[in-house]
């Protein structure tokens, strides 16, 4: 049944930290366009602040990898059923699904069977792996909102109604002045182990060991950058005493911009670091099974979004078996001792903002959602 006050209902599903941020920005824009709209679904703290009535919290089911997903499968199934039950109870006619493809594409199928119009924001990277999913997307997604220009052409070629709205990070990440990199002296290193608990478990120990080794080679100042929604206590006392180490939960962008180098888990954070102009080493580790499956399916020269957007290996990547404490420490030490290479990387990263498009992505995305809510399509 429809809610007693007859207000339009919008299901919103954002299953991870970056999606929560992007969805929240869109919801803020949508509130001005559709003041009577009620939103409900799955999201994090930022979506809740933007007015989302949460059926469940995204932190409950946000993991990476095949084996990691098995651990939260029972809860994910329960949340899946809860969301559909709320759609039926409220009579919702439209859904906004944000990223989180393993969950959201299955949800899109169930919603399509109910006649619910599906807007998908931050498209699944089917151009990178498991391209067969694009046929399903064409059947169950009414409007695809993509962040990168090349994605629009790819999806339209496969029968998906896609619109390039630009990347919301262009607005979310400010332009900050970076201090010049000087020869010698103390080096500041910021560590971004990921936004999901599973990523932190995989990257925290190896990053801590790497900076401990690096501290034997040079004078370091360490900054753990804590993603929204994570417990800062997990990062305290990880690096042995005696090193200058700080856990950063506020003014994250300022801390990153002030660093000489970042060790960054692959994901949206690499774009944030890149937009701030901080040189980085991209690191990623998953279970052996997930890694093996990924290698058989992914056909890309790089995995980091920075390198994909710039279309060249602008930043180094250390993945899986290559991401050891020794290799990370050695590469970081070499980079921090090579001002020419660091400045060259900063020059490459300066192109990112232009490559990601104009500001106003959230506003453009909200305008499309508004049209769909009104029964219109592009």
Image (cartoon, rainbow, N blue to C red):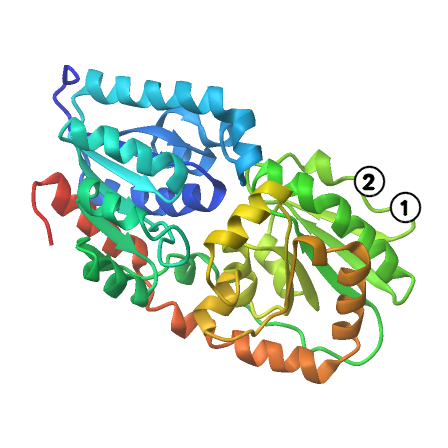
Q: Secondary structure at mark 1?
A: loop
Per the image, the residue denoted by label 2 is 237
Report, in whole angstroms, how far the alpha carbon at label 1 lies from the one at label 2.
Answer: 7 Å
Quadrant of residue 236 within the rendered picture: top right
Q: Residue at x 53, y 61 (%)?
A: 304
Quadrant holding the C terminus: bottom left
Disc marking residue 303: none
Image: 321 above or below 331? above
The x, y position of residue 182, in whole percent, is 76, 80
Does residue 192 sit above or below 198 in this rendering?
below
Q: Which quarter of the figure has residue 181?
A: bottom right
Q: Could you tell me which secondary element the residue under label 2 belongs to? A: loop
- What x and y, as percent, mark residue 174? 48, 63
Q: Is residue 259 visible?
A: no
At horizontal 13% and vertical 30% (from top left) the residue drawn is 115
Vertical relation: 104 (above or below) 161: above
Whether residue 21 appears in this view of the structure is yes
- In the image, 114: left or right of 21? left
Residue at 68% x, 39% y: name it: 201
**Which residue carries the number 1 mark?**
241
Q: How many marks?
A: 2
Q: Residue furthest front?
A: 296
Q: Nearer the viewer, residue 74 or 375?
A: 74
Question: What residue is rendered at 75% in x and 51% in y?
Answer: 207
Residue contact at pointers 1 and 2, CB within 8 angstroms: yes
Quadrant for residue 119, please give it.
top left
x then y, percent, for residue 173: 48, 60
- State the residue lying farthest toward the bottom: 340
Dot 1 alpha-carbon crowd within 10 angstroms: few under 14, some 14 to 19, many 20 or more: few
Residue closer to the observer: 147 or 278: 147
């Amino acid at each position: 049944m429809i809610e007693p006050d007859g207000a339009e209902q919008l299901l919103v599903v954002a299953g991870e930290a970056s999606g929560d941020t992007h969805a929240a920005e869109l919801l803020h824009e949508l509130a001005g366009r559709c003041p009577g709209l009620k939103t409900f679904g799955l999201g994090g703290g930022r979506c809740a602040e933007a007015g989302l009535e949460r059926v469940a919290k995204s932190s409950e089911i946000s993991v990476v990898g095949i084996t990691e997903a098995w651990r939260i499968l029972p809860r994910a199934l329960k949340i899946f059923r809860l969301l559909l039950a709320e759609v039926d109870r409220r009579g919702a006619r439209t859904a906004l699904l944000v990223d989180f493809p393993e969950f959201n594409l299955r949800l899109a199928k169930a919603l399509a069977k109910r006649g619910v119009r599906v807007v998908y924001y931050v498209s699944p990277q089917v151009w990178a792996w498991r391209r067969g999913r694009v046929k399903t997307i064409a059947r169950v997604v009414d409007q695809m909102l993509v962040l990168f220009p090349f994605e629009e052409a790819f999806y339209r070629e496969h029968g998906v109604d896609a619109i390039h709205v630009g990347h919301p990070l262009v607005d979310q990440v400010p332009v900050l002045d970076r201090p010049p990199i000087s020869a010698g002296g103390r080096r500041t290193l910021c560590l971004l182990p990921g936004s999901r608990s599973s990523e932190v478990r995989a990257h925290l120990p190896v990053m801590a060991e790497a900076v401990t080794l690096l501290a034997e080679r040079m004078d370091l100042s360490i900054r753990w950058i804590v993603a929204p929604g994570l417990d800062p206590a997990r990062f305290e006392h990880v690096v042995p005493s005696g090193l200058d180490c700080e856990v950063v939960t506020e003014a994250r962008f300022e801390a990153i911009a002030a660093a000489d180098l970042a060790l960054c888990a692959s994901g949206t954070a690499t774009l944030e670091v890149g937009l701030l102009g901080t040189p980085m080493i991209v690191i990623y580790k998953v279970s052996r099974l997930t890694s093996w499956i990924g290698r058989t399916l992914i056909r890309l020269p790089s995995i980091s979004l920075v390198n994909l957007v710039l279309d060249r290996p602008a930043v180094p990547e250390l993945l899986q078996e290559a991401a050891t404490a020794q290799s990370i420490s050695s590469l970081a030490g070499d980079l921090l001792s090579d001002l020419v290479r660091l400045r060259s990387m900063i020059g490459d990263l300066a192109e990112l903002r232009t490559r990601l498009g104009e500001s106003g992505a959230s506003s453009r995305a909200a305008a499309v959602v508004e049209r769909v809510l009104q029964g219109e399509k592009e």
